[in-house]
């Protein structure tokens, strides 16, 4: 798939998101959030058009991938689950928020909590999101106090409100030691190497935007599976997970 075909696919996913947003404003999606999604689509278009002008090929959604998954990081679910699902995420990304607010809860209930999928979160802050890298740092600062997932949730559901003062408020809400958290957050290079490693790993997996996922089988730290792109409906994830669980049972 060339860059423009990928662009059309990305814009189609975004258009679905916009339709969902437009029909759900009364249910909590504001006009400001809808505008954020439009801005995101414009930024994606600029990135992909730049790739095309430079002769680069954008990755195709659902491509097969095989790469070394670095040990450690943040995960939930059974370490011996037959499938691993890695999300490369940007906490400021409205599409990551959309995935989190829609499909993620069902994936967690039906597959992560039942021991069928281990879910791994990787940082992939995008350059055109001013608050994304700070938020990635904030997640790791919260992890030092054992509250990574709680802080992650707070940041994703407030993706458009990730300024430094807001992060302090979220830290208090999840009952962190706020002065300790602030001291950590004020050292922006503290986790730079780890965040850059996540970004580099995502690059090896063909990740270009967020959210992107790799769903597959982990053997000897090597993850083999497929890349899924965008805030797809739960039914799409469900079908692919079921397909790969069936394949795992035949191995």
Image: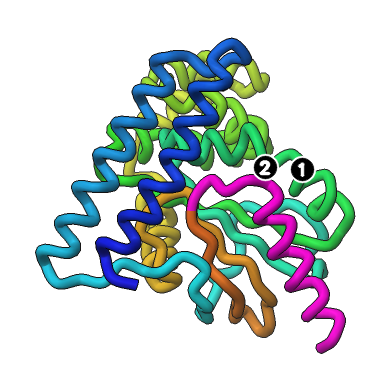
Residue behind mark 1: 106
Q: Which residues are magenta?
A: 230-251
Q: Secondary structure at mark 1?
A: helix
Residue 241, given in percent of the width and then of the height, sits at: 73, 64
Q: CA distance from mark 1 to mark 2?
A: 6 Å
> Where on the picture, by quarter, is residue 109?
top right
Residue 246, magenta (yes or no): yes
Image-based side of 136 in relation to 55, left or right: right
Question: What's the magenta bit mostly, secondary-structure-wise?
Answer: helix
Label 1–label 2 contact, CB within 8 A: yes
Residue at 74% across, 73% down: 244
Please tell me which residue is depicted at 60% across the width and 79% down the height of the picture.
224
Q: Is residue 76 above or below residue 171?
A: below
248 vs 47, left or right, is right
Q: Residue at x 65, y 61 (%)?
A: 85
Above or below, 31 against 206 in this view is above
In the picture, the disc for residue 201 is none
Identity of the residue drawn at 29% across and 46% down: 44
Q: Is residue 10 visible?
A: yes
Residue 223 lies, in percent from the top left, at 60, 77
Which residue lies under the disc numbered 2? 103
* Residue sticking out furthest to the bottom: 251
């Amino acid at each position: 798939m060339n860059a423009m075909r990928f662009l059309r696919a990305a814009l189609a996913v975004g258009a679905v998101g916009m339709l969902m947003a437009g029909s759900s404003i009364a249910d909590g999606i504001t006009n400001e959030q809808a505008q954020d999604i439009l801005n995101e689509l414009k930024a994606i278009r600029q990135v992909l058009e730049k790739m095309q002008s430079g002769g680069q090929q954008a990755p195709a959604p659902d491509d097969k991938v095989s790469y070394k998954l670095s040990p450690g990081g943040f995960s939930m679910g059974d370490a011996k689950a037959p499938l691993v699902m890695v999300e490369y995420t940007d906490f400021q990304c409205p599409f990551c928020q959309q995935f989190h607010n829609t499909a993620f809860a069902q994936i967690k209930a039906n597959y992560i909590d039942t021991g069928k999928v281990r879910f791994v979160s990787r940082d992939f802050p995008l350059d055109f999101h001013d608050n994304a890298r700070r938020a990635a740092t904030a997640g790791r600062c919260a992890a030092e106090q054992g509250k990574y997932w709680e802080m992650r949730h707070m940041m994703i559901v407030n993706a458009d409100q990730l300024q430094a003062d807001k992060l302090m408020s979220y830290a208090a809400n999840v009952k962190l030691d706020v002065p300790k958290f602030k001291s950590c957050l004020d050292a922006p290079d503290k986790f730079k190497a780890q965040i850059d490693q996540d970004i580099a790993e995502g690059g090896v997996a063909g990740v270009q935007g967020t959210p992107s996922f790799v769903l597959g089988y982990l053997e000897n730290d090597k993850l083999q599976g497929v890349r899924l792109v965008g805030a797809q409906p739960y039914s799409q994830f469900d079908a692919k997970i079921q397909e790969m669980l069936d394949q795992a049972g035949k191995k």
